[in-house]
Amino acid sequence: MIPELTLRRPDDWHVHLRDGKALASVLPHTARQFGRAIVMPNLKPPVTTVALATAYRNRIRAARPAGSDFEPFMTLYLFDNMPVEEIDRAKAAGFIAGCKLYPAGATTHSDAGVTDVRHIDNVLARMAELGVVLQVHGEVTHEHIDIFDREAQFIDEVLAPLVERHPKLKVVLEHITTRAAVDFISGARAGVAATITPQHLTYNRNEIFRGGIRPHFYCLPVLKTELDRRALIEAATGGNSRFFLGTDSAPHARGSKESSCGCAGMYSAHAALEIYAEVFEEAGALDRLEGFAALFGPDFYEVPRNEGTVTLRRDEWSIPRAYAFDGDIVIPMRSNEKLRWRMISA
Ligand code: DOR
Ligand code: ZN
């Protein structure tokens, strides 16, 4: 049994840090675990310009715990008729990791998103020219498509043609949930990758309904079948550099989840790396955790790998039932449960 595991300091390539008091509540967790993170732009109003991204970045940096050298990478929220010049400004800014495609209506605060990707083809072309990465929330929104089929349908209907139309564009399919997505990414052209969350590696969709309806297991894309989960585990632990870490940690106050119309999102920033470590250990692939968590992401985004290390010790601890959040509480992933790994130093 390995008592300790030291890895190059990891990064989170997809996280929701929110803003204001909520930001102050969750940032210490992310900043403790990760050297850098790509921060999603789905605020209200969304982060659609470099000016807004700059101001948001400054708020995040100002909210870091004393002594933290955590660095946020920002994203711009794509919308119909976005001016192409914004992409030039994004490239020049130096801290913008890409632009996020939210199909309008697909998830939390996506109503201002893109109604048809054809409307942003000129923007995507400029992104390809300048090497700005496209991050994709991969779900169609059609009412007639079953919620469990929305990712697979998006790949066929939107993503596969988009990747062909823009052969130089770097694309990350975010928080993949299906075997179909694993197969698509594995077989795609160079420059196409995916992030995988701890919740989609840990649970299948039964969890949402186990003994009653459990809103804290509701996220988007929604949890899928056990076969899908196994495909994700194989992808994450298989050493393929196209698959890397992105928690999609998405905190909501307890009351907004435990509601007749609860919000989508699971909070995992408090223990993300430890949860991934359990998944990798169970798959017999602890030696591949470092690639997934700390090497493949920076290589894809063409930024240097982090210099420092983090150490996990095999030392059981209990995750609290809740953490303080925005004057309320957030129920974290694995709430009230024991974890085998504990991060002891960063
Ligand atoms: O579950 C989710 N929550 N999925 C998303 O795509 C957005 C996120 C959020 O911002 O709450
Ligand atoms: Zn997200």
Image (cartoon, grey):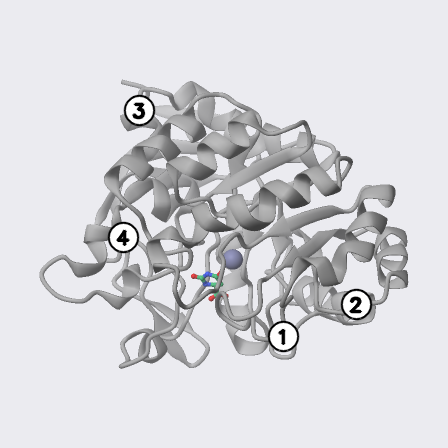
Q: What element carries label 1?
A: loop
Give the residue at x 81% y 43%: 128
Q: Marks 3 and 2: which is nearer the front?
A: 2
Closer to the chain start, of discs 4 and 3, is 3
Asked whether 207 or 316 is in front, the reply is 207
| Left or right: 131 in relation to 217 | right
Residue 278: x and y, percent?
Answer: 31, 34
Closer to the chain start, of discs 4 and 1, is 1
Residue that badge 3 annotates: 283
CA distance separating discs 4 and 2: 40 Å
Closer to the chain start, of discs 3 and 2, is 2
Q: What residue type is labelled 3?
A: Ala
Closer to the chain start, of discs 4 and 2, is 2
Q: Residue 334 carries which label?
A: 4
Within 10 Å of the Cα at label 2, are there few (<14), some (14-19), or many (20+) other Cα atoms? some
Give the residue at x 62% y 68%: 115
Q: What residue type is labelled 2?
A: Met
Q: Quadrant of residue 303?
A: top right
Q: Is mark 2 on a helix, strand or loop?
A: loop
CA distance separating discs 1 and 3: 40 Å
Give the residue at x 70% y 68%: 79
Q: Is residue 7 visible?
A: no
Q: Which mark is residue 82?
A: 2
CA distance separating discs 1 and 2: 11 Å
Asked whether 228 or 285 is in front, the reply is 228
Closer to the chain start, of discs 1 and 3, is 1
Residue that badge 1 annotates: 112
Residue 95: x and y, percent?
Answer: 78, 52
Q: What residue type is labelled 1?
A: Ala
Beta carbon at label 1 within 8 Å of ligand 1: no
